[in-house]
Image (cartoon, grey):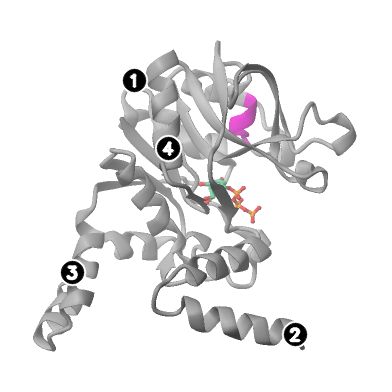
């Protein structure tokens, strides 16, 4: 299976940080967000990855490219650990790029992948969303896709106050963590939301999705919404993801993800924990 990572959005919720740099390149602890996303795809057994980029996103390509000068420098000064880490970034997957000409919404970004996925089911991992779990989120979805042969998306329960920020599902429970989806609503008012199960940024989509996107008219925010196209799929499942999701496009979630990931780091975790205990007391 191939993976598609949309990363062409303007990141307006994170301005001014995203004025001249992609939000997908914002570091979470010591790595850019999109590196976690690519690592998740690779850990799920996918090594053919298409990143949908746009104007001002060049640093994403540079990050996954080989860096001869840097590698030469690290080798010469004996920084072997750094060298291996840097070499691994450019070797972990076959990464391809396509540019979304105009930031016209997530559905439009996915449509840019039509040629590359070439009639097969494919995984979508949002480039600004980190999923932390024992079994990679995309792997969890691939397993369900292999069992049921239908499009499958990751969902999570969100508190009432967050419902208006997400695509929300209406579904029938098939088993403990699995729903067959009947309807999807993009960013509903709490009073109109059919549940508090939100779409989280990981999908396995069958290629019929492209026809549905092509027939869409602009939805919420005047954009071509992937959620609207998914409504027309014959069958679609929602898997309550076992793990934690961070939407990096949201400043507070970005901060929380950095802190949580840094707290787990063997070198800095302890130090950070005592610093936080100290400032929380004040
Ligand atoms: P978001 O809706 O969070 O991205 O899309 P955005 O439009 O950049 O965010 P704000 O609301 O202005 O802050 C989720 C993912 O889809 C990509 C984004 O780059 C992000 O990784 N995306 C979104 C595209 O590739 N193209 C688009 O037209 C919109």
- Left or right: where does residue 155 sit relative to residue 29? right
In this view, 67 is above or below 130:
below
Categorize mark 3 by other alpha carbons within 10 Å: few (<14), some (14-19), many (20+). Answer: few
Quarter of the image where one finds residue 31: bottom left
Pick whichever, 205 or 265, lies toward us.
265
Q: Secondary structure at mark 4?
A: helix
Looking at the image, which is closer to me, 70 or 212? 70
Mark 2 and 1 residues: CB-CB less than 8 Å, in contact?
no
Residue, disc 4: 138
Of badges 2 and 1, nearer the viewer stands 2
Mark 1 C-beta to ligand 1 under 8 Å: no
**Along the polypeptide, which appears first: circle 4 or circle 2?**
4
Crowding at label 2, few (<14), some or many (≥20) Cα neighbours within 10 Å? few
Q: Which residues are magenta?
A: 224-228
Q: Position of residue 231 (x, y in %)?
A: 63, 20
Work out which residue is located at the far right of the displayed protein and give it. Answer: 191
User: To which residue does mark 1 refer?
Assistant: 119
On residue 84, the disc is: 3
Q: CA distance from mark 1 to mark 3?
A: 36 Å
């Amino acid at each position: 299976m191939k993976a598609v990572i949309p990363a062409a959005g303007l990141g307006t919720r994170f301005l001014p940080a995203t004025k001249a740099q992609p939000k997908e390149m914002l570091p979470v602890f010591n790595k850019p967000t999109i590196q976690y996303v690519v690592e998740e795809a690779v850990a799920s057994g996918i090594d053919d990855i298409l990143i949908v980029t746009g104007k001002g996103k060049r640093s994403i390509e540079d990050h996954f490219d080989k860096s001869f000068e840097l590698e030469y420098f690290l080798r010469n000064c004996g920084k072997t650990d750094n060298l291996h880490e840097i070499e691994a970034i450019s070797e972990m997957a076959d990464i391809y790029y396509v540019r979304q000409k105009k930031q016209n919404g997530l559905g439009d970004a996915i449509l840019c992948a039509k040629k590359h996925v070439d009639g097969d089911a494919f995984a979508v991992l949002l480039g600004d969303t980190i999923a932390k779990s024992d079994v990679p989120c995309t792997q969890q979805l691939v397993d369900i896709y292999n069992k049921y042969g239908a499009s499958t998306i990751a969902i999570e329960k969100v508190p009432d106050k967050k419902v208006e920020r997400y695509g929300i599902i209406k579904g029938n429970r098939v088993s403990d963590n699995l729903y067959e989806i009947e309807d999807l609503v993009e960013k509903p008012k709490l009073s109109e939301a059919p549940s508090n199960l939100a779409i989280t940024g990981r999908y396995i989509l069958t290629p019929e999705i492209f026809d549905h996107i092509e027939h869409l008219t602009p939805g919420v925010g005047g954009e071509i919404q992937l959620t609207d196209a998914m409504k027309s799929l014959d069958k679609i499942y929602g898997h309550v993801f076992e793990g934690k999701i961070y939407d990096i496009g949201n400043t507070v979630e970005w901060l929380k993800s950095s802190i949580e990931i840094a707290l787990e780091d063997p070198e800095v975790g302890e130090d950070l924990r005592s610093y936080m205990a100290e400032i929380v007391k004040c």
